Image (cartoon, helix red, strand yellow):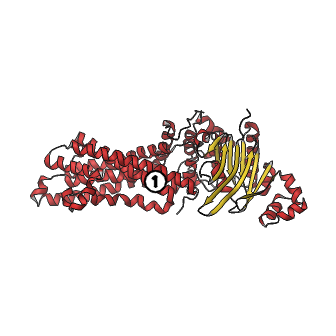
Amino acid sequence: MPPPPPIAVERLVKIYKTIPAVDGISFSLKPGSITGLLGGNGAGKTTTIATIMGLTTPTSGRVMVLGANMPKQRYRVLHRMNFESPYIEVPMRLTVRQNLTVFGMLYGVDDLHGRIAELGRLFDLTDLLDRPTGRLSAGQKTRVSLAKALINRPEVLLLDEPTASLDPDTADWVRAHLQHYCRERQATLLLASHNMAEVERLCERVIIMKRGRIEDDDTPARLLARYGRRTLEEVFLDVARGSSVAGEAAQ
Amino acid sequence: MTVPTESAYAVSPQRIAAMMLRYWYLLRSSWPRLLDLVYWPTVQMITWGFLQYYIATNAGFFARAGGTFIGAVLLWDILFRGQLGFSISFLEEMWSRNIGNLMMSPLRPMEFVIALMVMSVVRLSIGAVPVTFLAIGFFGFNLYGLGLALVAFFFNLMLTSWAIGIFVAGLILRNGMGAENLAWSIMFLFMPLTCVYYPVTTLPAWLQPVAWALPPTYVFEGMRALLIGQVFRGDLMLDALALNAVLFAAGIFAFLKLLQSARRHGALLQTGE
């Protein structure tokens, strides 16, 4: 029997009181793939990611991660997943090393000292390991959050704006590292971002959401061709402003 | 990597230790937090201690009831600071916006609760132990002179404080930081009803059953029986223990249900006001 897809979302609906945040979306990701989840504010990206992580319960439909039904069976797989989001922080009073130690223990990481040293080298944090996280610059904090997200060498990684607050050089370096990590470990990455250049560079597939629904789902190249645009940003604007019909006509 | 078990109720000592380490790092990094642990218990003990000293020199009954006020203050502090210690450690996660990280980690709710319980004892020890020695120095009141009774008092009061703390944590998870005030104030609802400074018979008859439904009432009555009548009331401690078992189970049940409801309503995504 083939292994289950790392992430399988089936007819997912999430309604808060009477407002549908996610309205019947379905998609499935391949192992080792990098997928971009795009959409304007309120499109349903955060709710989708939170449901995949088991943080919120679907109103209907099903979310399977590594074969486990989320959130019911989340403890079967949470140690094989991780995530990073600018909306959730690591404790600021703790030093970088203390934070990585605590999360490493929570995720049951073997040879934690070695792993922290490795992540320190990888994210250029070695000199910052004993500094309180709150005293770091925004870019350094983002690198700490990414180090935390990779502490357990996750098979499924969910990142929300992973390069926000990073300078172009560091952002480029982080993207290269994420690409390398996914290729090397066959890890599946779902990336929510407003940085279209980043999505274009990293993702082999793009899912565009609008008002809780999937408006389009394809490779960046095919999306550009279908909408007759030169950049994903233009495609995004077409979708956000309701020009998908024009896109279909262009197709 | 250690292989975790699937059950939501499985408990991993390593994950509990991780959370305790997190709170220990936090306490160690902040002297105002440490000072705050000792400050109020000390001020309260000294204020009430002098009041008792004044009354004892002016009234025969209180002269015989030596130590009941200071004893009540110290025991009340165990109850109040125990709950506060639990709630503040929990609130640290809300204040630092770290609760999402924890809820999406393999940490089980019960492991989180156990870590918070242990940390409430640690925080209480840092705050209350020095104060008990000050009570000996200032007023000659030796709380440890209560011997094994103190163990029974302490255990029962901690169980109550944890049950309330667990319930309040659930309310905050479900309702956001708008419910934070409960963490600071809920115990004061118990103060008049659990008869901290006076016997249950002081209450109107219709209110007395309410008082007897609360486990701390038995502890404070037991303390007065010991200090005034020199009798250890084991029966009161057993009654308190039985009520505490019910209260604690109800607290855990409510916490799990509120957490479930928070997941359903997306409240874990919006942990603000």
Viewer-nearest residue: A120 or B194: B194
**Horizontal and vertical percent for residue B62?**
13, 56
For mark 1, what is the residue?
B169
Viewer-nearest residue: A136 or A77: A77
Residue B119 position by quadrant: top left
Q: Residue at 82% x, 66% y: name it.
A: A243
- Label 1: how many residues lie within 10 Å, few (<14), some (14-19) or many (20+)? many
**Horizontal and vertical percent for residue A110?**
59, 33
Residue A225 in the image: above or below residue B120: below
**Horizontal and vertical percent for residue A104?**
58, 40
Viewer-nearest residue: A180 or B164: B164
**Horizontal and vertical percent for residue B31?**
43, 52
Residue B168 position by quadrant: bottom left
Residue B124 can be seen, yes or no: no
Relative to A49, is B16 on the left or the right?
left
Residue B253 in the image: above or below residue B51: above
The disc labelled 1 sits on which kind of residue? Ala
At mark 1, the secondary structure is: helix
Q: Residue at 43% x, 50% y: name it.
A: B166
In the picture, the quarter occupied by the C terminus of chain A is bottom right
Relative to A245, is B219 on the left or the right?
left
Q: Residue at 90% x, 61% y: name it.
A: A250
In the picture, the quarter occupied by the N terminus of chain A is top right
Residue at the far bottom in the pictured view = A241
